[in-house]
Amino acid sequence: MNLFAAEEENNREKSRPLAARMRPRTLEEFTGQRHILGDGKLLRRMLDADRIGSMIFYGPPGIGKTSLAELIAKATKRRFRRLNATMAGVKDVRELLVEAENALSTSGTQTVVFIDELHRFSRSQQDILLPDVESGTISLIGATTANPFFSLVAPLLSRSQIFEFKELDHDDLLNLMKSALSDSVRGLGNTKVVVNDDALQMIATLSDGDARRTLTALEIAVLSVAETTRLVDLEVAKESLQKRVVRFDPNGDDHYDVASAFIKSIRGSDPDAALYWLARMLESGEDPRFIARRLVIAASEDVGNADPQALLIATAAFHATESIGMPECRINLAQATTYLACAPKSNASYKAIDAALHDVRTQSILPVPMHLRDGHYKGAEKLGHGKGYVYSHDAESGWVQQDYLGVNRQYYEPVARGREAEFKAWVDQLRQSRQQPEDHDHNSDQ
C-alpha cells in the first residue's frame, strides 16, 4: 500500500509544472526580495527571533509570495493552512479559525493562515479574521496583487505588517533557470537539452521579473526540442514565449501608476517617456478613451494658455478615439501626446479656478454688482439692475475701465511662457489701468 502511495505521489510530482516543482524548499533557496529578507532586514529579523505576527504580502504575481509563506510556516514550526479568497466563503473561514483555536488549546501550536488573493474577500469576510488576528490565535499572511491600502479594511491593516514584494531582477531569473536546468530530480537536468545563453537572456528579459512565467517559458522551450534537436536557441525561445502579456489590472496599481507616469512625462516635456507609457497602456489593454480623457485634462491643466491650441488637438484626439477606435486611434493619441509634451507649459488657469473655488467655499459670497445684473426683463430698471453698465465694444480699444467683481482680487497669474506671455503683458496692463482713478458714473451706484 505504501509502495502504491509513493508511486502515486511520484507521478503527481512529475505532472506538476516546472515552476511548481522548483519552489524553494528552504529560506536559503528563496530567490529575490532581499530588501525585506536579506541579512538584517525586518522580515529576516522577525524570522530569526521567531516573532511572526500577521503580515500582508503585496506585489505582482509570480514573485514568491506563496512560497515565502510556506517557508515561514516551516521555519517557525507552525501549522500551515491555506485558503484562496476567490473560492473560500465565510463558512470555510470560520471552520479554519475554529480548527486553529483547537490546535492552540490542545497542543499550544499556532497556525499560519495563508489567504491568497486576500483583496477578493468582502469587508465582512475580512472582519471575521480580526478577533483571531488580534488575539494571536493565528498568524495571518495575506497575499494580494492589489494595493492593500485601497483593498483591505483599515482594522486589518493596523494589525498587520505590510511587505511590498518586487519583481525579480534579471540575474535572479537567470539563476532560477540555470538551477532548473541542472536539477535532475525536480528540474530539467535529465533532458540533456542545451540552452544557448542568448535564449536564456531573452526569456529573462521578457518575463518582467515573474519567476513563474520564466520557468514556464523555459519548460516549454526545453520539452519542445527534447526529442529532436535538443537545442534551445533564440528562435525556439521566441516561439516558447509567444505574445508577451503586459501585466494590467484596470483597478490596480498598474492602471494608476502608468497613467501617472504618462501625465507626469507630458508635464515634464519628455515626449519619448510619454510615448513609452502610452504604448504600455495600449499594449496592456487600457481603454483608449481613458487615455484620451487624460490628454484633454492635461491640455488645460499643464499646457493651458501657454499654447491654447493644445486643448483643440487633445479634444480632436478624443473624438477620433471615440470614432475610429483601436488600433488606428493609437496614431491620434500619439500625435496629441507628443504635441502636449513639446508644448510650453502653464498651470495658471488650473491654479486660478482652484483659488476662486476656495474663496467661494470659505468666504462670504460676493453679491453681483448692480451694474452687472441682468437688466433685460420688465421691472429691472426700477430695481436699478444694469444701471451704469458700459458696453466694452463701444470703446475704440474694446476695453473700458469698469469694476466686474466689487472687490480687488487676483486669481489668474499668467506665466511668461509661450502664448501666455502675451496674455500676461495684456492682463498686467489692464490691472494697472484699473488702479487709476475712474471716470464713469456707474461707480457711484455701487
Image: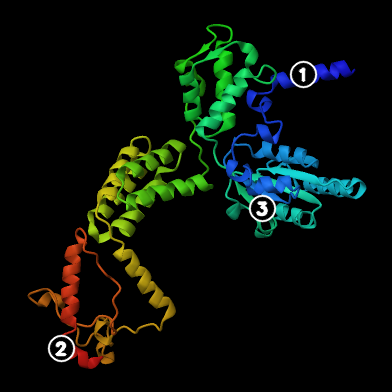
Given the image, on which type of amino acid does mark 3 rest?
Gln
Given the image, on which type of amino acid does mark 1 rest?
Asn
Is residue 3 depicted above or below 339 in this figure?
above
User: Which residue reaches farthest left?
Assistant: 396
Chain-order first, disc 1 or disc 2: 1
Mark 1, residue position: 10
Residue at 34% x, 38% y is 330
Labels 1 & 3 near each other (Cβ < 8 A): no
Q: Secondary structure at mark 2?
A: loop
Residue 132 place in picture, x, y as percent: 79, 54
User: Which residue reaches farthest front?
Assistant: 40
* Residue 437, numbered circle: 2
Mark 3, residue position: 161
Category of crowding for the residue at label 3, using alpha-carbon neighbours closer than 10 angstroms: few (below 14), some (14–19), many (at least 20): some
Residue at 75% x, 50% y is 51
Is residue 16 depicted above or below 162 in this figure?
above
Horizontal side, residue 221 vs residue 104: left or right: left
Residue at 63% x, 51% y is 162
